[in-house]
Amino acid sequence: MSRIDRVEVHEFEFDAHNLARDGVAQTITFKRGSTVRLSKFAVVVRTADGGRGEYVAQWVATKSTLGQALMLCPRLVGKDARERIAIYEDLKRDIRQFDHMGHGPIDIALWDWAGKRYGASIAELLGGYRKRLPAYASTYHADRAGGLHCKEAFVEFARHCRALGYRAFKIHGWNDGDAREEAENVLHVAKHVGHEMTLMLDPACELRTFADALRVGRACDEAGFFWYEDPYRDGGTSAYGHRKLREMIRTPLLMTEHVRGVEPKADFILAGGTDFVRVDPEYDMGITGSLKIAHLAESLGLDCEIHASGPAHRHLMSALRNSNYYEVALVGPDCPNALPPVYACGYTDQLECVGDDGCVDVPTGPGLGVTYDWDFIAKHRTALHVFE
């Protein structure tokens, strides 16, 4: 038995430059000269036989998720770290009254522990075979501050991404959800770069009405977009509403980012609410939960697209036949991807991580295959929670 005898949660903060919180939706967008302070947390799982697994939460690292992680971490103490499925089932039940977002980083840390124990990457443990992953540049939301502030700026940035090697480009529009402006942007970008880049649109639930979603969807049809994602303000959760939208447009819908876990995603798919399935190892109860969802999609003949970026995401995608693109998110001109500089090994998900072939590497070292900069985390730490 590899008994878990200590679990740590490290809260820390860092500054991201030329970025600010949008006044409408409080999402992060470009603002030259501004600095936004962001908080993240890291999970460390230790076992009595000297094993250690770790993961720095990125996309899921909100205060609400942190609260759920702190609720779940004490439940790990005394369990066998090898029994990831049993732990997954226990934690899933424990957090059934909530949205499950605090579960993912814990499961990923357990996979990191396993990889280090057996001297293999997570990709190898999964039977992964894809060494290079086709990537798309996923933009910040459009702004009014001189970054991605107009349709011409989106074209200029798409061309910059193409010059770096990207073959695909996803637009996040304006948070105020003007359907006319969004449709014009879709058509303009397609006119100028659609012949050399695969294009996607993610309004991130910003469009206000079904009619707005339909209008923009028809622009995507005309422009030949690869997918249309989470269009309007149902929050991405209405299978009925999106089935109706699918019946009225040709562009495939990519849904279920905001539907958590394998059973609700199965319900959404079987109700006809999506063409592609969305999964995220941070959002969907870890690599364990994400594999269930990817295999569900595969069993129904659907592709499963991984949300966001990170080493866990790359390992997961390496083992999936039915996944098209790795999301390098979020990126824009003259600003960083707002991820903390926590890697001491050269790993990066900044805009320039892509190769000339439009792909990114899968890490090959044990576990996650990355080395975290614990000096940086300790220097910027705001709280340490220990359970033993």
Image (spheres, helix red, strand yellow):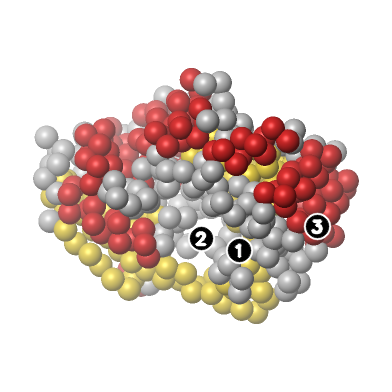
> On the image, numbered disc 2 is attached to which residue?
339
The residue positioned 75% from the left and 39% from the top of the image is 225
Q: Which residue is mark 3?
A: 180
Q: Quick one: 375 or 386, which is closer to the camera?
A: 386
Task: Check contact, mark 1 vs mark 2: CB within 8 A.
Answer: yes
- At x 46% / y 35%, what residue is drawn? 265
Query: Label 3 is placed on what type of residue?
Result: Arg
Q: Amino acid at mark 1?
A: Pro
Sequence order check, earlier mark of 1 and 3? 3
Residue linked to disc 1: 336
Please say if 300 is above or below 356.
above
**Callout 3: helix, strand or loop?**
helix
Query: Which one is earlier in the sequence, the residue at label 2 or at label 3?
Result: 3
In the image: residue 322, left or right of residue 63: right
Q: CA distance from mark 1 to mark 3?
A: 29 Å
Q: Residue furthest bottom?
A: 33
At mark 2, the secondary structure is loop
Left or right of 186? Residue 368 is left
Q: Residues within 10 Å of mark 1 (few under 14, many from 20)?
A: some
Q: Is residue 365 visible?
A: no
The N terminus sits in image quarter: top left
Q: Are marks 1 and 3 in contact (CB under 8 Å)?
A: no
The reply to whether residue 286 is visible in this rendering is yes
